[in-house]
Amino acid sequence: MTNKLIYLDNNATTQVDEKVLNSMMPFFKSEYANPSSMYDFAKTSSKAIADARVKVKEFFNAESEREILFTSCGSESANTAIKGVLETNKDKRHIITSKVEHPCVLNVYKKLEKQGYKVDYIGVNYNGELDLEQLSEAITDDTALVSIMYANNETGVINPISKIAEIIKSKNPQTKFFVDAVQVAGKIPIDVQTCGVDLMGISGHKFHAPKGVGALYVNSKTIISPLIIGGHQERGKRAGTENVPYIVGLGTACEEAQSFLKYEASEVKRLRDKLESGILKNIFNARLNTGLANRVPNTSNIGFEYIEGELILLHLSDLGICASSGSACTSGSLEPSHVLRAMNVPFTAIHGSIRFSLSRFNTESEIDYVIDVLPGVIEKIRNLSPYQDELEALRTQKAAAGCSCM
Ligand code: PLP
């Protein structure tokens, strides 16, 4: 074990930014009023929510603050969007999503399918890119909703959201389009107006706000019914006393994220690319699972052939390095990820696939350290692999192609 912590699992969660934390603090202790109360003491907390809503609205580039709902997480945003749209549109019974969505969308769709909805699950190619032709063919007059994620949590592959919106609306202008944008928030610019989406969800803890707060954009032309019924909060669309400090934190995180977008696109991407090329150059049984697909700047999904991903993670953990196999929700099970299965990642690499996801808090020396120690870790595990003949053949093949890696 080492004292050093190198956190490369930022698609699972992120550390809270200092500015975000500082902005939240007064609302735990001195400004604790219920924002719905009538007295003057409540004015600071209700104004803080209003200010945060403006910041989130600007983050989405929404038309109005009235289009922003605060939620508790990305999963609640997705559940509210999907169930909220279908509840107000009961005569249509067809819905569409992709095979590689996060469980907070996929499992809702599976439940709806059991309840009698006709569901189309759109596939992806070997790089993780959505099959747009299949999507276009699937849309009918009966399609109530399409849910497609902005970027995949395991691979970082970005879907062409504007193009998808165009396809949907040209086939059926009444079909609503929900986008789970949890993995793009803070990584690439978001603009709901140019994207042409109806609903979009984000989660604070993926971009340096705390766990327990999220937001849902619902455009003014879309009517949803609430998931949580009770008081009049969030204009009747989400009951429950507002989580003032966390909402304030989300607002600050949105503001901060905007100011770091250039840094993400240049420096975070540079470090991610350095890590990736260092691994691919130095380790002969490594392959980039996403090929040339367009990705968010922080994510790399690499398959190490003929070895087990869990073993790699345990060895890395002993060195203080945090990474992930599969998504945070599915790792812990030995089933290969549904995302990599949908991409047809070969069986030789699917069990040994590792996701590295960076943030603006990672440093060059951390990346150098990982590039330095990972080949030794992989070699140690390779020596235990039952696939020695296959590994030897792979080594010979790579050497013939001019690779001198170990
Ligand atoms: N959507 C995507 C793409 C995610 O990666 C995650 C979390 O991993 C979620 C939704 C769920 O977000 P939360 O953990 O805030 O519910």
Image (spheres, rainbow, N blue to C red):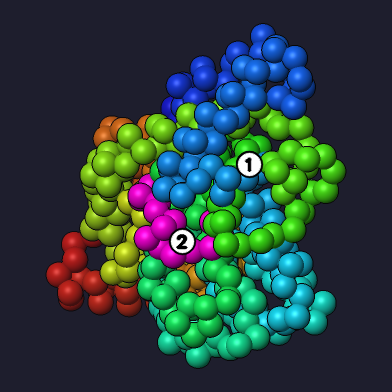
Marks 2 and 1, how far apart in space? 19 Å
Which residue is denoted by mark 2 in the rendering? 150
Q: Which residue is nearer to you in this view: 346 or 127?
A: 127
Crowding at mark 1 (Cα within 10 Å: few <14, some 14-19, many 20+): many
Q: Which kind of residue does numbered mark 1 sit on?
A: Phe
Q: Position of residue 390 (x, y in %)?
A: 40, 76
Q: How many marks?
A: 2
Q: Which residue is nearer to you in this view: 160 or 293?
A: 160
Q: Which kind of residue does numbered mark 2 sit on?
A: Tyr
Which residue is denoted by mark 1 in the rendering? 70
For residue 36, what is the image quadrant? top right
Is 188 included in the stretch rendered in magenta? Answer: yes
**What secondary structure is found at the residue carrying circle 2?**
loop
Range of the magenta residues? 187-200
Residue at point 71% right, 32% down? Answer: 242
Residue 125's disc number: none
Visible residue check, residue 28? no
Is 370 included in the stretch rendered in magenta? Answer: no
Q: Position of residue 381 (x, y in %)?
A: 46, 56
Residue at point 41% right, 75% down? Answer: 166
Residue at point 60% right, 13% down? Answer: 26
